[in-house]
Amino acid sequence: MLPAQLNKVFSRHFGFQHLTPEEIEHRTLALTIIVLITLLDFTYNLAFYLFGGRFTWWTTVIYFLASTINLVIFKIKGNFRRFRNIQIVLTILLPLVAQITHGGFTGSSGVVLAAFLAPLGTLMFARVRTARLTFFAYLFALLVAGVWEYLARPDPNNLPPEVHLMFFEFNFAFTAAVAYFLMEGFLKNKAALLKLVREEHEIADRLLLNIFPEETARELMEKGSVKAKNYPAVTVMFTDFVGFSAFARTLSAEALVEQLDFYFNAFDDIICRHGLEKIKTIGDSYMCAGGIPTPRPDHAFAVLDAALEIRQFVVSQRQQKIEQYNYPFEIRIGIHTGPVVAGVVGSSKMAYDIWGETVNIAARMEQTCEPDKINISEAAYALVKDQFECIYRGRFPAKHVGEIEMYYVYERFYEI
């Protein structure tokens, strides 16, 4: 609303250049209004004098001196709140005194109307409570002006009616113009603030959607919490790099994070293409699932397709990694199908997670797998055996479940 150079000059001279651009503009506007009111009051008195009225120069001088002292104190102390409150009082008193010294409402052409700028400006510079108190102070000034005119019965001045009309128009036009530009500046700042709030809200929404499944994120935004849900059929996959803990000790922290980020970014892209849900990473272990949060009948096929792509990606990078780090990045993949419970845990740093025996068995499938193999349970095998080449590899004992048969998956069958 104000020229940038004016903001720069005032903020540097009075020492508030460290504040936000909005606050700098508000303070610069307050200082600019002081200068304008001083000049306008002098011009107003001079015009009255030129048309045969009294030249009440002392009102301008007192306002100028009081404002100057207030500005000096503000420059030294930096207390804008005290400076603002003093100027509010002066901005109400000056038009009131001008009206009284020029013969009341009619004689002064209603100059007290200019005092309305005090509560209006306070809406921009202070809290609503302060602005409301300033508005009541303005109403009190109007009451004082009316009571004084009723009791004093001032003599009308000798100004021509045309001059009175001109001053009435000027007072209304000046007050309306300042009021308009104050409101315009307020609305521009409000629009900018609303735009910033919308942008921050969109960032927060995108962040939530990146952390949680879309359905879960929407529920969290609307209700503030997420109710745990049971899923009767979900396929869970774990991946893990063979011997990674020993290899990690040979790397710097930056290189370690860089390599994990390289592989996990690729895994993220793969499971996203197949419509799977990433659950979490723990060290070099990557966990995802198919069939949550939106159930789908082909969850096992989607997970197996993603597993084959992940294995192929890791193998394709092997020679380069051996040359670079002398470590092959061999991967184990374990998959199991069964029921899970899914939901959000915690009240801070919340995380979407799944629980149940299915998760434990999928983890054991990965742990008992050989390098560069995809090890699936009999439950997953029963769903995919007609479309994937699977080789039986034996059993392993699982707590509370008994022995579970396992199969290695090699490739998908494609119709010719």
Image (cartoon, rainbow, N blue to C red):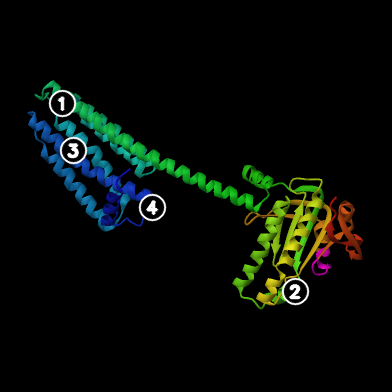
Q: Which residue is mark 2?
A: 243
Disc number lying in front (2 or 4): 2
Q: Which residue is mark 3?
A: 40
Which is more N-terminal, label 4 or label 3?
4
Mark 3 neighbour class, 10 Å CA radius: few under 14, some 14 to 19, many 20 or more:
some
Image quadrant in which you'd find residue 255:
bottom right
Task: Report the disc number at residue 20.
Answer: 4
Q: Position of residue 92 (x, y in %)?
A: 25, 37
Magenta-colored stretch includes residue 53: no
For the point 25% across and 58% down, which residue is it?
A: 76
- Report, in whole angstroms, how far the alpha carbon at label 3 lies from the one at label 2: 83 Å
Residue 246 vs residue 138: left or right? right
The residue tagged with tag 3: helix, strand or loop? Answer: helix
Q: Position of residue 188 (x, y in %)?
A: 39, 40
User: Which is more toward the observer, 58 or 190?
Assistant: 190
User: Which residue type carries mark 1?
Assistant: Gly
User: Which residue type carries mark 4?
Assistant: Thr
User: Which residue type carries mark 2?
Assistant: Gly
Q: Which residue is mark 1?
A: 107
